[in-house]
């Protein structure tokens, strides 16, 4: 493939992906409101469009036209930079995620992925770590006590759960022997006894998946680990002083992170885009992507389900849980996997 | 409290502490309570509740009203249990007047009071759970509360500000179908309580957040003058309905749930069990509802029936007199306490022999209960303060009056 064509294809893919991701972010908010609503004897959004489907558009417009208030007591450069850091790095990590195999157009094989980095997983972990800065800086630069407490909670929580998150993934890496997400998925091909898929979750990584699930909830600040924005304690936590589009950026970052985490879980534990593939060539190209989205959707649904069910941890309990339970469990899982693979 | 000053200002300490102002507009201060916290990191060093943001002047307003005109004002004292306020006020005035209330009115009062307790506890459970992050329980509770409010609307025409009790009885006969509706509700409500408990009682996160949190000993609870579930959660077995019965409560069988631990979970368990006991009392009241009049035989106090007022001269005269110049109450003073959902609600009324009270004072259970906040929370985390405020179930309307 000539270099100019590669660039053109990459740009087109980036644009499409960004469009899909932002739409997914908007509609996961809609989905959450709808699902939680039905769990709680409510309807969720119903007014804008059929089933409230245009609600995300209305919300987006509202955010755009709201007054962008900058309180006088903030430290401006960081106050403005913080939401951007959060949203940019939340959106970046999606670029190395493969959604399916590849299609062949005009003799060129084009993968369903913006770029296939051979250390894709490390890139995602690194980029999401930088995302913490957005939250911490927002809390500090707002110069507000609630924001500060929220920012402190967020950074402490994200840093401590990142370790468990990373360790829970190492088991998968040992089994696949690669950092490339595509190769990790390829390693999960096939079936046990002809019908149980050889996904990592069924292949000895159930504890790893469990650790990942919990750490991921904490990483994305979701119930029951939503302390940084615990509205009944800290009003709105680190984004108390933010309004309009700046607030929307934090909101987008949170949901984009959720989607990234769901994609990662699908790739590493749930066999990625693997699923029954049949029919004509066009269907064979589309179906893997479809299975991928189905799995991501299921993971997101669990997120929402948990939110509708559980109360919130307390700060010290959250830290104790992370360091005294989750981290040892992740290490045990890692040792167990290593022993099993070496043997 | 040593650090209470006339103008509530907390200065930050010399070293690393910070003053955090919670409220009066804050999601979990249940109305307009303001709490000043001196915090060291997330640990609360000192805590100071500041009240008075919902002062309505109702106590003073009462002095300018006829006795029967005070009833609607009492609704607005503790707006989560208006009927309990109505009851306490009319009982106090009836005591001054020496009125004999017919049994049907008394049983209806008990029935409605227990429904009010359910209503109030449902709001408490929902908001308390939401403070700790369980949002779904809140909406489940409000689903059942809606039905209770509809029943109130059925009897009194109002969902919240009921004003249904009168000095000498009850305003109107309950409409047709009311008792069936209550019976229906009493039938399915225990299942709903199971549903709330499924979401909370055994939930490890819920127990982690509530067990051992904001502990208060029985001695402290008595010394600070607490009452109601806040007192019983600390293991003190006292309930006005059983120990100083009023309005025929002595004719009902019910248990008074107590817990020994004195923490948030103990108070939670007390109230949840009270929900079940209350529905039992409602059932007993329905089954044993006596026949007879709903108003006392005291024509100078109780408004005559509409029918009689239109057809009989004497009734018309009484009606005119009561409406225009009220009824005189013998001089004296009286204190009447009832068990409100929050504890001891008391009305102290001084009469100078005229048709208007000389002084009406409400003893608010929440005011005393709120005093326990520093005892419960100092040295604990911010999140525990929220849990503690939720667990004492305050209503600011009652505190500020």
Image (cartoon, rainbow, N blue to C red):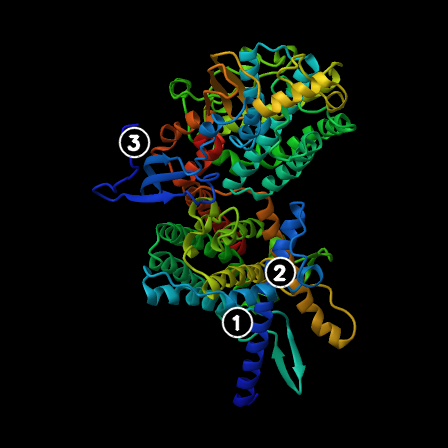
Q: Nearer the viewer, mark 3 or mark 1?
A: 3
Q: CA distance from mark 1 to mark 2?
A: 16 Å
Q: Residue at x 38, y 38 (%)?
A: B35
The local crowd at label 3, few if under 14, some if 14 to 19, many if 20 or more residues have their Cα within 10 Å, is few
Q: Quadrant of residue A48?
A: bottom right
Q: Are marks 3 and 2 in contact (CB under 8 Å)?
A: no
Q: Are marks 3 and 1 in contact (CB under 8 Å)?
A: no
Residue B221 to residue A288: above or below: above
Return the x and y of residue A5 as percentages of the image width and height. 56, 88
**SS type, badge 3:** loop
Quadrant (top left, top right, bottom left, bottom right) of the N terminus of chain B? top left
> Quick check: B396 left or right of A49?
left
Return the x and y of residue B377 as percentages of the image width and height. 38, 32
Q: Chain of mark 3?
A: B
Q: CA distance from mark 3 to mark 2?
A: 55 Å
Residue sitting nearer the eye, A7 or B216: B216
Residue A248 to residue B10: above or below: below
Badges 3 and 2, same chain: no
**SS type, badge 2:** helix
**SS type, badge 1:** helix
Quadrant (top left, top right, bottom left, bottom right) of the C terminus of chain B? top left
Please say whether residue B232 is visible from this viewpoint: no
The local crowd at label 1, few if under 14, some if 14 to 19, many if 20 or more residues have their Cα within 10 Å, is many
Q: Chain of mark 2?
A: A
**Disc number placed over residue A95 in the picture, else none:** 1
Return the x and y of residue B277 as percentages of the image width and height. 63, 21
Return the x and y of residue A118 as percentages of the image width and height. 50, 72
Q: Which residue is mark 2?
A: A296
Q: Nearer the viewer, mark 3 or mark 2?
A: 3
Please say whether residue B71 is visible from this viewpoint: yes
């Amino acid at each position: 493939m000539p270099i100019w064509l590669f660039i053109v294809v990459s740009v087109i893919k980036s644009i499409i992906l960004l469009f899909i991701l932002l739409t997914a972010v908007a509609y996961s908010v809609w989905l959450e409101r709808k699902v939680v609503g039905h769990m709680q004897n409510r309807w969720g959004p119903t007014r804008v469009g059929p089933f409230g489907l245009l609600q995300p558009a209305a919300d987006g417009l509202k955010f755009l036209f709201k007054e962008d208030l900058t309180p006088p007591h903030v430290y401006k450069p960081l106050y403005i930079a913080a939401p951007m850091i959060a949203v940019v790095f939340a959106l970046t990590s999606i670029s190395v995620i493969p959604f399916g195999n590849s299609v062949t157009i005009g003799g060129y094989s084009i993968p369903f992925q913006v770029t296939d980095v051979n250390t894709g997983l490390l890139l995602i972990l690194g980029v999401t770590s930088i995302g913490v800065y957005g939250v911490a800086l927002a809390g500090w630069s707002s110069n507000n006590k609630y924001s500060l407490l929220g920012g402190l909670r967020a950074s402490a929580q994200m840093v401590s759960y990142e370790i468990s998150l990373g360790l829970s993934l190492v088991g998968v890496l040992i089994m696949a022997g690669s950092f490339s997400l595509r190769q990790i998925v390829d390693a999960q091909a096939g079936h046990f006894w002809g019908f149980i898929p050889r996904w990592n979750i069924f292949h000895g990584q159930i504890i790893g998946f469990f650790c990942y699930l919990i750490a991921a909830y904490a990483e994305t600040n979701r119930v029951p680990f939503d302390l940084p924005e615990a509205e009944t304690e800290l009003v709105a936590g680190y984004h108390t002083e933010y309004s309009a589009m700046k607030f929307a950026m934090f909101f987008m970052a949170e949901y984009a992170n959720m989607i990234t985490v769901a994609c990662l879980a699908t790739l590493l534990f749930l066999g990625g885009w693997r699923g029954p593939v049949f029919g004509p060539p066009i269907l064979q190209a589309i179906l893997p992507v479809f299975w991928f989205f189905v799995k991501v959707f299921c993971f997101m649904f669990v997120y929402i389900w948990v939110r509708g069910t559980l109360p919130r941890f307390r700060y010290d309990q959250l830290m104790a849980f992370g360091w005294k339970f989750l981290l040892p469990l992740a290490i045990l899982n890692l040792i167990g996997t290593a022993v099993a693979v070496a043997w | 409290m040593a650090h209470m000053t006339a103008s509530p200002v907390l200065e930050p300490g010399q070293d690393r502490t910070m003053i955090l102002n919670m409220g009066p507009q804050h999601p979990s201060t249940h109305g307009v309570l303001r709490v000043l916290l001196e915090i060291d990191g997330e640990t609360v060093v000192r805590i100071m509740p500041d009240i008075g943001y919902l002062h309505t002047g109702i106590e003073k307003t009462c002095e300018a009203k006829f006795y029967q005109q005070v009833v609607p004002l009492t609704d607005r004292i503790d707006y989560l249990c208006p009927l309990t306020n109505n009851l306490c006020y009319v009982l106090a005035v009836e005591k001054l007047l020496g009125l004999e209330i017919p049994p049907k009115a008394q049983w209806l009062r008990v029935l409605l009071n227990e429904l009010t307790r359910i209503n109030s506890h449902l709001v408490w459970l929902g908001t308390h759970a939401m403070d700790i992050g369980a949002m779904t329980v809140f909406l489940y509770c409000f689903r059942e509360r809606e039905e209770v409010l509809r029943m109130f609307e059925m009897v009194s025409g109002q969902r919240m500000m009921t004003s249904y009790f009168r000095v000498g009885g009850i305003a109107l006969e309950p409409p047709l179908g009311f008792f069936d509706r209550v019976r229906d509700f009493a039938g399915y409500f225990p299942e709903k309580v199971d549903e709330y408990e499924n979401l909370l009682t055994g939930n490890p996160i819920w127990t982690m957040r509530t067990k051992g949190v904001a502990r208060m000993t029985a001695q402290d609870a008595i010394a600070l003058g607490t009452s109601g579930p806040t007192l019983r959660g600390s293991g003190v077995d006292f309930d006005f309905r059983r120990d100083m019965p009023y309005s025929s409560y002595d004719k009902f069988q019910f248990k008074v749930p107590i817990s020994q631990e004195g923490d948030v979970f103990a108070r939670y368990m007390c109230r949840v069990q009270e929900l079940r006991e209350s529905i039992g009392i409602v059932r007993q009241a329905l089954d044993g509802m006596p026949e007879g009049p709903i108003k006392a035989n005291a024509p100078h106090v109780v408004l005559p029936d509409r029918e009689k007022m239109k057809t009989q001269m004497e009734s018309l005269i009484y009606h005119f007199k009561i409406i225009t110049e009220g009824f005189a109450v013998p001089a004296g003073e009286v204190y009447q306490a009832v068990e409100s959902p929050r504890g001891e609600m008391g009305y102290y009324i001084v009469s100078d022999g005229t048709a208007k009270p000389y002084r009406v004072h409400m003893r608010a259970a929440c005011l005393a209960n709120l005093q326990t906040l520093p005892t419960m929370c100092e040295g604990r985390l911010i999140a525990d303060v929220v849990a503690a405020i939720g667990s004492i179930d305050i209503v600011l309307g009652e505190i500020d009056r």
